[in-house]
Image: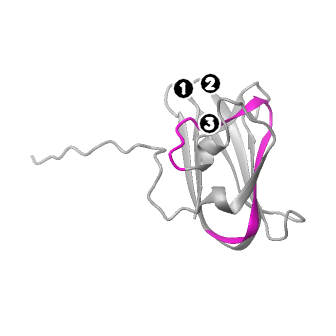
Amino acid sequence: MRKRIIGQVQQGSEPPGDWLNVDGLAEVEISSEDPAHPIESALLPGGTIGWCAAGPGKQTIRLVFAAPQRLRRIWLNFVETRTGRTQEYVLRWSPDGGQSFREIVRQQWNFSPEGATSQTEDHHVDLPAVTVLELSIIPDTSGGNALASLAQLRLA
């Protein structure tokens, strides 16, 4: 029998891509932030700790672009290793500076410390002129005290 051992795929590690420099293109608005886990850790390459909310409940991260951007890919990674919970997130975009929004995706994920500790989503889109990209996170749909977090967000 022939066999070959392949390396484990690191779920959640940043995939290759020609990612936008969000730092130079957008202002970030957030509903809250744990000072030990700033939003920059989730948005900028090389960040290792990710963003975390300062308190429980629904949280919003909004990227307000200085000039309209064409988006073809939105890559998200969420990690939860401590608490079992069902999280819901909604991605929306605006072509008119936030006057109106269009939903891209609404999705739920069940985290479990015994197994499902990472959610990675790679949304391939064709959004011609994004002025605002909004990510809303409900960290626990049952209303528990879980904190919203985001390990990484990349845009292309």
Q: Does residue 111 show up magenta in the picture?
A: no
Amino acid type for the residue under numbered disc 1 = Pro
Task: For marks 1 and 2, give the CA distance.
Answer: 6 Å
Task: Name the residue carrying label 3.
Answer: 110
Instruction: Report the front residue among 129 and 77.
Output: 129
Quadrant of the frame with the C terminus: bottom right
Residue at image mark 2 = 83
Say which residue label 1 marks. Answer: 113
Query: How many labels were placed on the picture?
Result: 3
Query: Which badge, 3 or 2, comes first in the chain's sequence?
Result: 2
Q: Is the stretch drawn in magenta largely helix, strand or loop?
A: strand
Q: Are marks 1 and 2 in contact (CB under 8 Å)?
A: yes
* Mark 1 or 2, nearer chain start: 2
Determine whether label 3 and label 2 are within 8 Å by CB: no
Would you call the spot at circle 3 few (<14 residues within 10 Å), some (14-19), or many (20 or more)? some
In the image: residue 54, left or right of residue 109 = right
- In the picture, residue 145 is in which quadrant? top right
**Tag in front: 3 or 2:** 2
